[in-house]
Amino acid sequence: MWNLNPAYLCTQHLLGEHKEIHQAVGSILKGRSLKGHLEKGQLEIHNLKKRHAELVREMKKRNFNHNSPLPDFEEFYAGKIDPQKNKLDLMKRCKKCRVRIKDQDKKEKQT
């Protein structure tokens, strides 16, 4: 989970995070450990449903079809993501995201 404004994410990262949320929920339902992801600050179990909804809204804004609702699962408090660290990491990793972040930040400053 990047835990950033979904408008920042290029298509690859938007769809990738969506897929990873589904994978995390699948792991929870199967009783698999997510300890490594939690320790690395990559996942917030308590925000999976909210984050999924945010990503779906952005996908719909981009005219993507979304046909994969999250299965029902019980959220619990676990994990902590550092959005500022993730924003810097994403800007280093992905030119498309870097452009989107800069454009979105400009739009937010104008309003």
Image: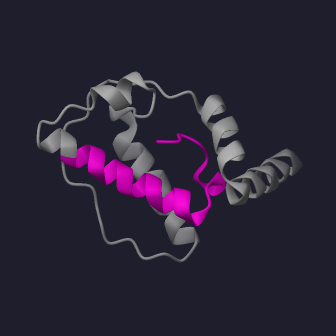
Q: Is residue 69 above or below residue 91?
A: below
Q: Main secondary structure of the magenta part?
A: helix
Residue at the front extreme, as displayed: 93
Q: How many marks?
A: 0
Q: Nearer the viewer, residue 76 or 88?
A: 88
Q: How was this image coloured?
A: one colour
Q: Does 86 sit above or below residue 102? A: above
**Up-down relation of residue 94 to residue 57 (above or below):** above
Q: Is residue 17 magenta?
A: yes
Please state the horizontal and vertical placement of residue 76, each as a whole percent of the image. Answer: 26, 28
Seen at 74% across and 52% down, the residue is 98
With 98 as the anchor, is 41 left or right in this view?
A: left
Please say whether residue 73 is visible from this viewpoint: no
Of residue 27 and residue 46, the one placed in the foreground of this image is: 27
Residue drawn 32% across and 72% down?
67
> Which of the 4 image quarters holds residue 34?
top left
Residue 24: x, y in percent?
A: 28, 44
Residue 98 visible in the displayed image: yes
| Magenta stretch, residue numbers | 1-26
Looking at the image, which residue sits at the far right?
A: 110
Whether 80 is drawn above or below 88: the answer is above
Instruction: Indicate the position of residue 49 as horizontal and vertical percent values.
Output: 35, 45
Residue drawn at (80%, 51%), measured in percent from left and top? Answer: 102
Q: Residue at x 65, y 38 (%)?
A: 89
Residue closer to the observer: 4 or 23:
23
Q: Give the left or right position of residue 68, taking residue 43 as reference.
A: left
Q: Is residue 61 left or right of residue 44?
A: right
Q: Where is residue 94 drawn, in percent x and y?
A: 67, 53
**Residue 73 magenta:** no
